[in-house]
Amino acid sequence: VLFFTVPSKDAITLKPHPDEVDDVKWVSKAKLLEMMDDKSLLFSPWFRLIAYRWLIPDGGWWDDLSKTMTTDVHCDYVNIHCFDPPMEHMGGGGDAGPVWSAQLEDGDASKKQGAYGKIKTHTESKLAQLIHVDEVFSAVSLLYINPLKSNLENDYVTNKYDADDLAFCDEILCKVSRSFAAVIRQLPPTLLVDVLIFYLVLRALDTIEDDMKAFESNDVKVKHLMSFHKTALADPEWSMDGVGEGDEKRLLQEFPKCHSVYAALDEQSRRVIADITLRMATGMAEFVGKDLGQGTADVPQYNRYCHFVAGLVGEGLSRLFAVSGLEKPSMAKELHLSDQMGLFLQKTNIIRDYLEDYVDGRAFWPKSVWSKYSKTGDLGYFANQTDEEAAAKSLCCLNELVTDALELVPDCLAYLSNLQCKEVFRFCAIPQVMAIATLDKCYANPNVFTGVVKIRKGMSCKLINDTNDCPGVHSTFHAFAQSIARKARKANKAGVEDPSFERTIKACDTICELTAAEASKRMGAKDLLLPLALVGLSFASYSSTKSPVAGKPLIPALVATGLLGAAATKIVGSSGSSSSSSTPALKSADTITADRE
């Protein structure tokens, strides 16, 4: 925006470019306000934002033009201001509509911050999900036969913590993270609450970092981040209002309940949580002042961001495992492997959340990668999937980032092989197998650029059921690495020129080599599943003709098939749980505790 002051309108001659300026009018401040209220007139989004924020308010630039133009009273050389275009430029009367209008949804602003829930989610139809019979089996098993057991009602937990405050922590955990809630609850009682509070503390910190509107300046936000470990974790009455949205906002408002439970943790656990919180806040503060509208600058900065927000979480968890006595003390020193495991999860989320993050104005795809493929030099270039060239380039960019994440898998598997407690193993492994499944779903998938891609719920259930030991985990990684490699080779054979092809195949081959031996132990047992499925379908189809549910044979068929399949799932799980010379047997928390005593 360029400003001039002139004594009268006759003192200036305007010859605007017709492709850039539609009309010119000499107006008073009152007339400008009147015109901006006229819905038939379309102002540029940036002028409208600047005008309402600085130009026309009381005490704004227009009130004293001489002071505005001749002094620095209104100059701000420190803060970067982020603007969201008005709605008429997001699918209304403006020309920006075609790219975004089909992708932005109303969402539920009461639940999450930013663009979360407002971007289209790509899901498969119910029929498409039901034809994956093995996943139906797993869903039935997880819901009715072998559900994840919550240990929150254990005597150790109920005797140590305030019941009402712990109930709040459990409730809010389910609201802010459904995916982690189940795996946290199945942890042993002596570790469960430590991890639960660790997660909620970091989620509260993350809520402060994510809010782009609550703080008057970045300096104020940084001050809150850097003092969080001394306020939220030291003051039992500390809370924060007006930050975040929905359940995250409530978490900060009612944080004293979290502090009550935190204060009852063992000193070693509190020390770990406070240390990681301070270090994460320091890393977040480093990125607060950076303009991330076009992503991180390069891969090193991308890795650094992921380290602060996820790698440190991995380190903190390893230290909590060690101080609980359920894992060897050496786990507290597995800094590199802990970091890489966190990076694997974070990079998977960043890849999947391309559109949400871009619309939010805070993206993380590294510019040194995506700029090689963006013809316009803008990260949003890939969202226009109606352009054939943009669509092709977007997949090349996506595949390079997926490959970068796949290269972390060997360290993730190495970390898991060091664990001895079965419950801790499942807690760590379930998110990992979900991540490799998500990467397989994202690879060469144009839907990443038009919404949020998620794996099927039935597949999630199957992954949880199969994640009991190293053979099960290796079998999962082996299968998805093969799937990605098949997609890459098929595209290459069809003439698609993907610069990352060789690197992708190498990463997948490495994973397959590492997992082949353990995965082979599961293959024979899984062969039982198909015959049992066919028997179940045949039996169910016959039974349905005798059933009182006349005309609806699919219902009893699915129930009967699901029960037989669930039984097969249990057979597969138990047959693959034996130990081997390469992988030590996992022990239950009770066994480890008894051995230690």
Image (cartoon, rainbow, N blue to C red):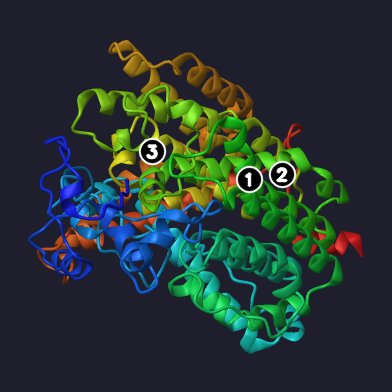
Residue of label 3: 441
Residue at mark 1 to residue at mark 2: CA–CA distance: 6 Å
Q: Determine which quarter of the picture holds residue 552.
A: bottom left
Foreground pick, 75 / 105: 75
**SS of the residue under disc 2:** helix
Disc count in the image?
3
Q: Earlier in the sequence, mark 3 or mark 1?
A: 1
Q: Amino acid at mark 3?
A: Lys
Q: CA distance from mark 3 to mark 1?
A: 20 Å
Q: Secondary structure at mark 1?
A: helix
The reply to whether the C-beta atoms of the residues labelled 3 and 1 are less than 8 Å apart is: no
Q: Which residue is mark 2?
A: 338
Whether residue 159 is visible: yes
Of 488 and 556, nearer the camera is: 488
Q: Horizontal placement of 93 versus 206: left or right?
A: left
Label 3: few (<14), some (14–19) or many (≥20) C-alpha neighbours in 10 Å: many
Question: Are the residues tagged 1 and 2 within 8 Å (C-beta)?
Answer: yes
Q: Which mark is residue 342?
A: 1
Q: Secondary structure at mark 3?
A: helix
Q: Residue furthest left?
A: 40
Residue 506 horizontal side relative to residue 141, left or right: right
Amino acid carrying label 1: it is Gly
> Which numbered dot is residue 421?
none
Residue 234 x %, y %: 77, 76
Which quarter of the image is occupied by the C terminus?
bottom right
